[in-house]
Amino acid sequence: NYVLNQATIANKDKQGAQGIHVDMSTDRDFSGLTFNTTGGTAITKTGIYLDSGSTLSVSGSSTGKSAIVLDSASCSTSCTFNGAITLASGSTTSVNGDQSHILDIGSKVVLNGDLTFAGTATATAASTSQTSSAMYGLWSQGTIQGNVILASGSTLATYGAGGQTMVIQGNGVTGYIQLGGALTSSVTTKPVTSYTQTVNTTTNPEAGPALFVQANVGHGIAILGPTSSNTGAAAG
């Protein structure tokens, strides 16, 4: 079964709530799949596609929530998700609550395809007064046999104490990581914007890294933007 979301998926006020949970107890093969977006574009070899204008919301109270999970708990050695995952431009993905994540890739999972963030995806802690909210945007503990793309105009963000936005662990990424959008890690959605403004780090602890790579990235990391002041390209 594949997921094509062109409307709203919502799961509210539940402990450990998830939006899309993929049981990776066996391989999942989407290599022969084709479907059309609302704009009529044919999409191939994709297992999860959040179309433009769609919403994936895991909101409200409680903790330990995730928008998308590739769950390898029942996978014996390794299991393959053979297809891409795309959060398309114009899509909105959000998760609220401490210890919550946007996308989890389990330690035994092999994602054989590109992972593309082109819309807006945010994880927001319950408050800014926690000393550790354990927030993650992308948390990959397995293997991505493809590329990780944060497209121009997109947003991938975590808001919470100690939050980390893009974490690459496990066996890393065989392709490249391309950052063309806004990769943000902050305690609050209203960050300090003035050098004269004082922050109380007791009530507003610091966030963690926006990008944390603890594994190999086969083809490197590109942070996109203008190469000179005369190019006219938008900054990454």
Image: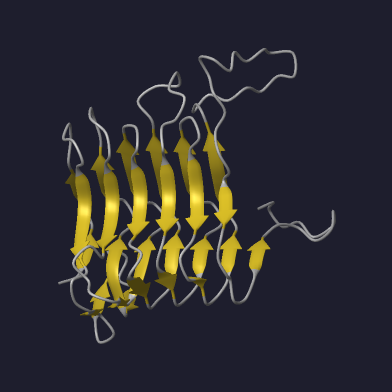
Kindly identify the residue that appears in the image at 37 percent across and 64 percent down: 86
Does residue 184 appear to the left or right of 144 in the view shown?
right
Visible in this render: residue 224?
Answer: yes
Visible in this render: residue 181?
Answer: no
From the viewer's perspective, is residue 109 above or below residue 87? below
The x, y position of residue 39, in whole percent, is 32, 65
The x, y position of residue 100, in whole percent, is 33, 40
The x, y position of residue 170, in whole percent, is 45, 65
| Residue 50 image-quadrant placement | bottom left
The x, y position of residue 37, in whole percent, is 29, 67
From the viewer's perspective, is residue 68 above or below residue 57? below
Kindly identify the residue that appears in the image at 33 percent across and 62 percent down: 106
Does residue 227 appear to the left or right of 197 in the view shown?
right
| Residue 20 image-quadrant placement | bottom left
Kindly identify the residue that appears in the image at 28 percent across and 66 percent down: 48
Does residue 196 appear to the left or right of 96 in the view shown?
right
| Residue 1 image-quadrant placement | bottom left
- Colouring mode (rainbow / by chain / secondary structure / one colour): secondary structure
Residue extending farthest to the bottom is: 32
The number of discs equals 0
Residue extending farthest to the front is: 76
Does residue 94 appear to the left or right of 217 in the view shown?
left
Q: Nearer the viewer, residue 108 or 54?
A: 108
Kindly identify the residue that appears in the image at 31 percent across and 34 percent down: 96
Q: Nearer the viewer, residue 155 or 219?
A: 219
From the viewer's perspective, is residue 28 above or below residue 202? below
